[in-house]
Image (cartoon, rainbow, N blue to C red):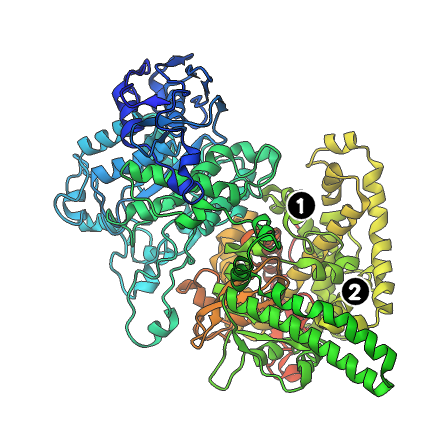
């Protein structure tokens, strides 16, 4: 036991460390220590702490501290990974305390741990630990463990920043990122440019002087926290215009939506007299020049540049190898950044943006905008609770060979609705959960994800210690929960007869009503059946069976109903008319066979009072949810990702076709599949356009042949859609297998026919729901056999190479294929077959269908064709094949593809299964704005095509208009043509590149394309959605060669 009068502690060799004096350490121990009454069972603190008059305790008189390394100038301003922060801490049973560390910062971490081992006795007479002997050897998982605090949108006094630094040090962070300027204010004083703060700060006194910044920097250094400032540009700079209006384009320009926004809006440069363009091809080189100049100045002063991910992934800037990229939008983007060889800081806004969930910070007048934004959620809702923060893995989706490039991560506190009054509670203890992930990693030593069950008591204790040190952190849980951690084991014990009946009943009332109701019927069931069998007539027997089934059905329904209401409640029911809602199943099958799925789903969402975009049904007694609400879709795909998956029923339905591939599996198995496939879609592979060029030349020859009349004239209508599916099959097999099936030149390829037929039958099976067992499968298995026989020889060839040959085969070698890359990782034939077929499905169908819809729309709009060709000629002329960068810089081309994917997303209808009891945030209650209860195993169908066509989300939503993208941007999760969240389409860049390349080459060759569809479908296209969305009646068009002859094949 450490007695209160004992205050002699050896100091650290460097007096600059925060606990450098014995007084500082003893002050923390004796004046800020915790009486752990909340952390033990009710009224059992006396059993936890030693007796007041006990003489059995051993006192610690001295802490021996040894620093084995030497500090130097870089110790206080280290690059990530330069400083050894490890430490060893031991406390023996005889009271010897010893700390060793290489650096002073390591000693600081050790002392922080030391203080957290001790509790204050409830009598106030001293400190104790009941954990001795202690032997801790500790080091951080990540070199960069940071928090970003925005001080521009709301200003914070220096003392609030210092208090946050104290909290960061407690939680073993080592970086504080201060977002020092933004559009709203410029609160930093720069002596050479005094008017920036004089006019850009909110008012006099709400700015930071050079002395303030120095004070903050030194305060951080003394606590092991490196401070760095962010000057965000070229966006987020409107505040500069208050002092230097000529430097900022479009400051306060109207209409606001056209010129403003959170990130760089290219329309602003239309108002810049030195640019006068919104074309990225014009703006990009200017931003590159700005970045190069600024980065050179930073390097000259010994600083490391950091950029937000858009500079690399959106603007495609060339960045130095020292540049760190800050990722925020998705895990996929972290992997894209490391895939290009750059160091990255992770911090997905879906998990680590602590400002989310407070609602809109803008105001809306009554009318359209009020209705549009009601109930005024912010873009990143919901609130990121500590469990979600703790569940985030900075390394998710990053290949093992690239994980060293993930330096760490940051939690972010943007200050639209946070200021000094609520700062502590907004940040802590949620940031503590991130701190543990960054220090220890998301996985434990065995490779398993760390459990919130064991994390919760640690976090609750840390919160109490923070409060005692003056940090007003919010509570982790009720005191009741801190006393008892609820687990499934606890629940099982409480249900046993040894406990009082009233305790068991109370538990069941809260969370286990289904068990109580179940017990009422288990024992009588056997007696009923036996009696009926022995004494009843056939009629009575039938009645009894019906009665028993009714009892079972009602029991199951009642148990589910209790659970639904406990979790959240119901949403509105889809309109059905037949018993057991059989008409819903019939309508689904009829819609699939007759290509009327859009009309079917629209009918389900229809109500007498207008559309309701989340509904439920119960065909044959099984509850289903249908939704086209972006908030619900975001929840399913991102914010509650682990709550939803494909599920076992989906896997069972699809296993013959897609096996255990990326499209049919969940959790670890899905993650392994994605890790296997993802490296094949890195930029270097995607930007290799040679494969496309070879097949585009064959495609154009076939187009000329099909589009020429018997007398040699151009303009004969033909089905370009059918031809595009053959073209993308050839390109996909070439990319994946090393050689094309030649379907463009040979229409009778058995594999191509079998591939389509398997999809057709698989779709019917999937849409039949509980009645899918009745679907005949003879044709399905016949064509599946043809498909398998086609891919097997390619697998044989790949496996004929030894692992050593595959490992040494260069990715640039002639004949290196996707299949070779897979075979280098696994020799399992089934794995190779399943992943190959899955990627082949995506590689052929998504690209072909989107290209088909593009020609369906633009062939009816000659002005779009003309405008598209003008842009192509401006960038690459009529002869040269475009490069990857050319495609990215053609804004109108990108807009045409965006608009096509908005109206015709590749996978318009999708499904997930609840993997656990969970919720959806919207659709319940009388207003439709309350949560919905989703018990485990509930299927949820969601539709991107209906969401992206909703008139309340997109103006003039049914009109094909690429021009809308010049001034309009969809809000997050209202446009997800490639899905979203961790399962976002891994090959989207491949698909967009192939589509863009194909459109450019065809528009170079043909100057006109005219539609013949009006007389075929009357302007109402048939939406054939078996797996991907394709034109059900084909796309019959006429192409006309440009004047001047055929295009070269360069």
Residue at image point 28% right, 51% down: 418
Mark 2 or 1 closer to N-term? Answer: 1
Residue 415 in the image, given as x and y percentages of width and height: 30, 50
Q: Is residue 417 visible?
A: yes
Above or below, comparing residue 1021 to residue 292 in the picture:
below
Q: Which of the labelled discs sits on residue 734, or is there none?
A: none
Above or below, comparing residue 175 to residue 722 in the picture:
above
Q: Is 994 in front, or is 113?
A: 113
Q: Quadrant of the N terminus?
A: top left
Residue 89 in the image, given as x and y percentages of width and height: 45, 20
Q: Look at mark 2 in the image and give the residue it sits on.
A: 758
Query: Helix, strand, or loop for circle 1?
Result: helix
Residue at image point 25% right, 21% down: 23
Q: Is residue 307 visible?
A: no
Q: Is 245 in front, or is 476?
A: 476
Q: Which of the labelled discs sits on residue 677, or is there none?
A: 1
């Amino acid at each position: 036991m450490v007695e209160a009068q004992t205050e002699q502690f050896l100091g650290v060799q460097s007096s600059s460390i925060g606990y450098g004096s014995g007084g500082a350490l003893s002050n923390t121990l004796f004046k800020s220590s915790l009486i752990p009454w909340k952390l033990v069972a009710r009224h059992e603190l006396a059993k936890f702490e030693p007796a007041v008059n006990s003489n059995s305790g051993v006192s610690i008189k001295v802490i021996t501290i040894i620093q084995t390394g030497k500090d130097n100038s870089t110790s206080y301003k280290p690059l990530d990974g330069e400083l050894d922060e490890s430490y060893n801490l031991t406390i023996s049973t005889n009271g010897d305390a010893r700390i060793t560390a290489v650096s002073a910062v390591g000693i600081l971490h050790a002392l922080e741990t030391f203080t957290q081992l001790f509790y204050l006795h409830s009598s106030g007479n001293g400190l104790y630990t009941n954990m001795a002997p202690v032997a801790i050897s500790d080091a951080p998982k990540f070199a960069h463990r940071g928090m970003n605090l925005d001080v521009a949108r709301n200003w914070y006094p220096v003392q609030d920043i210092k208090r946050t630094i104290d909290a960061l040090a407690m939680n073993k962070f080592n970086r504080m990122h201060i977002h020092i300027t933004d559009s709203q204010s410029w609160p930093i004083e720069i002596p050479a440019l005094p008017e920036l703060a004089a006019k850009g700060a909110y008012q006099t006194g709400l700015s930071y002087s050079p002395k303030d910044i120095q004070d903050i920097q030194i305060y951080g250094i003394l606590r092991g926290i490196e401070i760095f400032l962010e000057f965000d540009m070229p966006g987020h700079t409107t505040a500069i215009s208050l002092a230097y209006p000529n430097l900022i384009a479009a400051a306060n320009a109207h209409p606001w939506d056209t010129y403003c926004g959170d990130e760089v809006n290219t329309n602003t440069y239309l108002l810049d007299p030195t640019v006068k363009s919104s074309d990225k091809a014009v703006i990009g080189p200017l931003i590159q020049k700005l970045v190069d100049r600024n980065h050179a100045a930073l390097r000259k002063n010994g600083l490391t540049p950091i950029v937000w991910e858009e500079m690399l992934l959106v603007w495609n800037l060339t960045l130095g190898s020292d540049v760190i990229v800050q990722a925020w939008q998705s895990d996929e983007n972290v992997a894209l950044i490391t895939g290009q060889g750059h160091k990255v800081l992770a911090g997905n806004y879906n998990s680590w943006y602590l400002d989310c969930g407070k609602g809109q910070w803008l105001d809306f007048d009554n009318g359209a905008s009020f209705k549009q934004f009601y109930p005024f959620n912010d873009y990143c809702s919901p609130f990121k609770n500590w469990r979600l923060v703790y569940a985030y893995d900075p390394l998710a989706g990053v290949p093992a060979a690239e994980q060293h490039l993930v330096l760490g991560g940051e939690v972010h506190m943007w200050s639209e609705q946070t200021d000094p009054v609520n700062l502590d509670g907004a940040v802590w203890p949620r940031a503590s959960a991130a701190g543990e992930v960054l220090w220890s990693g998301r996985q434990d030593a065995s490779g398993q994800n760390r459990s919130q069950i064991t994390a919760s008591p640690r976090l609750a204790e840390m919160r109490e210690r923070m409060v005692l040190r003056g940090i007003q952190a919010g509570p982790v849980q009720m005191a009741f929960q801190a006393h008892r951690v609820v687990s499934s084991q606890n629940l099982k014990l409480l249900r046993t007869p040894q406990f009082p009946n009233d305790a068991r009943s109370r538990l069941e009332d809260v969370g286990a009503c289904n068990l109580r109701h179940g017990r009422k019927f288990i024992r009588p069931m056997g007696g009923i059946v036996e009696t009926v069998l022995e004494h009843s007539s056939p009629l009575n027997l039938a009645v009894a069976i019906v009665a028993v089934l009714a009892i079972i059905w009602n029991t199951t329904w009642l148990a589910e109903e209790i659970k639904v209401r406990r979790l959240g409640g119901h949403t509105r029911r889809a309109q059905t008319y037949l018993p057991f809602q059989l008409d819903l199943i019939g309508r689904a099958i009829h819609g699939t066979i007759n290509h009327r799925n859009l009309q079917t789903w629209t009918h389900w969402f229809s109500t007498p009072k207008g559309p309701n975009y989340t509904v439920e049904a119960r065909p044959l007694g099984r509850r289903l949810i249908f939704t086209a609400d972006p908030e619900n879709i975001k929840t399913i795909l991102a914010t509650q990702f682990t709550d939803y998956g494909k599920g076992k029923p989906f896997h069972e339905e699809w296993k013959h076709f897609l096996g255990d591939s990326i499209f049919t599996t969940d959790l670890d198995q899905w993650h392994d599949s994605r890790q296997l496939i993802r490296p094949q879609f890195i930029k270097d592979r995607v930007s290799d356009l040679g494969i496309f060029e070879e097949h585009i030349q064959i495609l154009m020859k076939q187009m000329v042949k099909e589009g020429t009349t018997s007398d040699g004239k151009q303009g004969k209508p033909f089905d370009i859609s059918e031809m595009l599916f053959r073209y993308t099959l050839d390109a996909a097999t070439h990319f994946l297998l090393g050689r094309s099936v030649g379907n463009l030149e040979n229409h009778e390829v058995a594999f191509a026919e079998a591939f389509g037929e398997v999809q057709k039958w698989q779709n019917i099976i999937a849409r039949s729901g509980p009645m899918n067992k009745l679907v005949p499968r003879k044709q399905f298995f016949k064509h599946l056999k043809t498909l398998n026989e086609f891919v097997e020889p390619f697998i044989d060839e790949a496996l004929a190479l030894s692992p050593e040959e595959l490992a040494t085969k260069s990715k640039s070698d002639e004949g290196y294929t996707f299949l070779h890359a897979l075979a280098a990782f696994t020799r399992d034939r089934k794995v190779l077959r399943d992943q190959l077929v899955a990627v082949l499905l995506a590689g052929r169908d998504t690209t072909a269908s989107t290209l088909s819809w593009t020609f369906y729309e633009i062939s009816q709009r000659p002005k779009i064709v003309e405008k598209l060709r003008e842009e192509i000629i401006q960038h690459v002329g009529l002869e040269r094949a475009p490069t990857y960068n050319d495609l990215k810089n053609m804004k109108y081309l990108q807009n045409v593809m965006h608009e096509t994917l908005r109206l015709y997303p590749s996978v318009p209808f999708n499904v997930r299964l609840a993997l656990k009891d969970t919720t959806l945030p919207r659709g319940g209650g009388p207003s439709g704005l309350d949560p919905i209860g989703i018990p485990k195993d509930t299927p949820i169908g969601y539709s991107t095509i209906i969401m992206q066509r909703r008139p309340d989300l997109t103006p003039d939503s049914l009109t094909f208009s690429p021009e809308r993208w010049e001034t309009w941007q969809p809000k997050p999760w209202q446009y997800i043509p490639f899905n979203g969240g961790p399962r976002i389409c891994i090959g989207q860049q491949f698909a967009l590149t192939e589509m863009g390349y194909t459109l450019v080459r065809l528009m170079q060759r043909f100057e006109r394309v005219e539609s013949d569809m009006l007389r075929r479908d009357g302007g109402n296209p048939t939406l054939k959605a078996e797996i991907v969305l394709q034109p059900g009646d084909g796309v019959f068009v006429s192409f006309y060669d440009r004047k001047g002859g055929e295009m070269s094949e360069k």
